[in-house]
Amino acid sequence: MRLSVFVNTEQDAELAHKIRIMNLNSGLEWNCTDPVKFEDKNGLNWAGCASISSAEKTELPAGAYVLIYTDKSENESEISFSVEYPEEFLELTSVDFPVPFDSLERKIAVYSSDDVLLYYGTEKKDWTDRSAVLMDYKNAAFVRVCYCLNNDSVVCLMPPENVGF
């Protein structure tokens, strides 16, 4: 189980210095001293942490969180958010999917060999087999089927499937 948290920096993302995330119920805290930074296709700047996890074999606590964003000038901004997920998902494995759950959507993620996400969304109709992905993404190495809930706020990644021969 991983948590990904990104904030719109409203300034150049390169000015992001660190991000601290705290769960208010448990007191758990994560410090991201090298946040991921990027500008999206709409020109918005983002900074965040993509792989927040708790101790091995424990789930991330649901509930209230606070994120503290610090820029290189040591200016801080605080944002509150919450994490919610169906507890029954914690017991499932990939062979259990798809599960009968309201609003469960099937999507696909395409990755390069160095784990860079190339595409995320609805599987294209002309991808009749995994190698057909290479027609659109020549540097694709593998895909993962994703089962998503709550507008992609909960994403269950299935095991990787190679697209090459």
Image (spheres, rainbow, N blue to C red):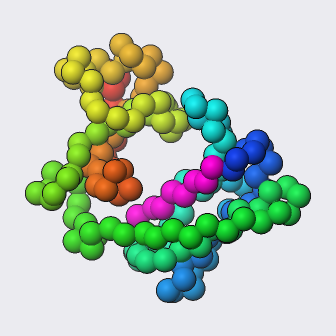
Q: Quadrant of the N terminus?
A: bottom left
Residue 119 visible somewhere in the drawing: yes
Residue 96 visible somewhere in the drawing: no
User: In the image as oriented, which residue stretches furthest toward the top?
Assistant: 135
Question: In the rendered structure, does residue 5 fall within the stretch colored magenta?
Answer: yes
Q: Residue at x 77, y 66 (%)?
A: 76
* x and y, in percent, of residue 147 in the image: 26, 49
- Is 31 placed left or right of 112 in the picture? right
User: In the image as oriented, which residue stretches furthest toward the left?
Assistant: 100
User: In the image as oriented, which residue stretches furthest toward the right?
Assistant: 73
Q: Is residue 54 above or below residue 44?
A: below
* x and y, in percent, of residue 58 in the image: 41, 77
Q: Is residue 126 above or below residue 95?
A: above
* x and y, in percent, of residue 125 in the image: 21, 21
Q: Residue at x 64, y 46 (%)?
A: 46
User: In the image as oriented, which residue stretches furthest toward the bottom?
Assistant: 26
Task: Please tell me in which quadrant of the rendered image residue 28 appears.
Answer: bottom right
Q: Residue at x 80, y 48 (%)?
A: 15
- Is 42 placed left or right of 103 in the picture? right
Q: Is residue 139 above or below residue 116?
A: above
Q: Nearer the viewer, residue 113 or 77?
A: 77
Q: Main secondary structure of the magenta part?
A: strand
Which segment did they paint magenta?
1-8
Task: Please tell me in which quadrant of the rendered image residue 108 appears.
Answer: top left
Q: Residue at x 36, y 13 (%)?
A: 135
Task: Please tell me in which quadrant of the rendered image residue 100 appears.
Answer: bottom left
Question: In the rendered structure, does residue 9 fall within the stretch colored magenta?
Answer: no
* x and y, in percent, of residue 60 in the image: 44, 73
Q: Quadrant of the C terminus?
A: top left
Number of on-image labels = 0
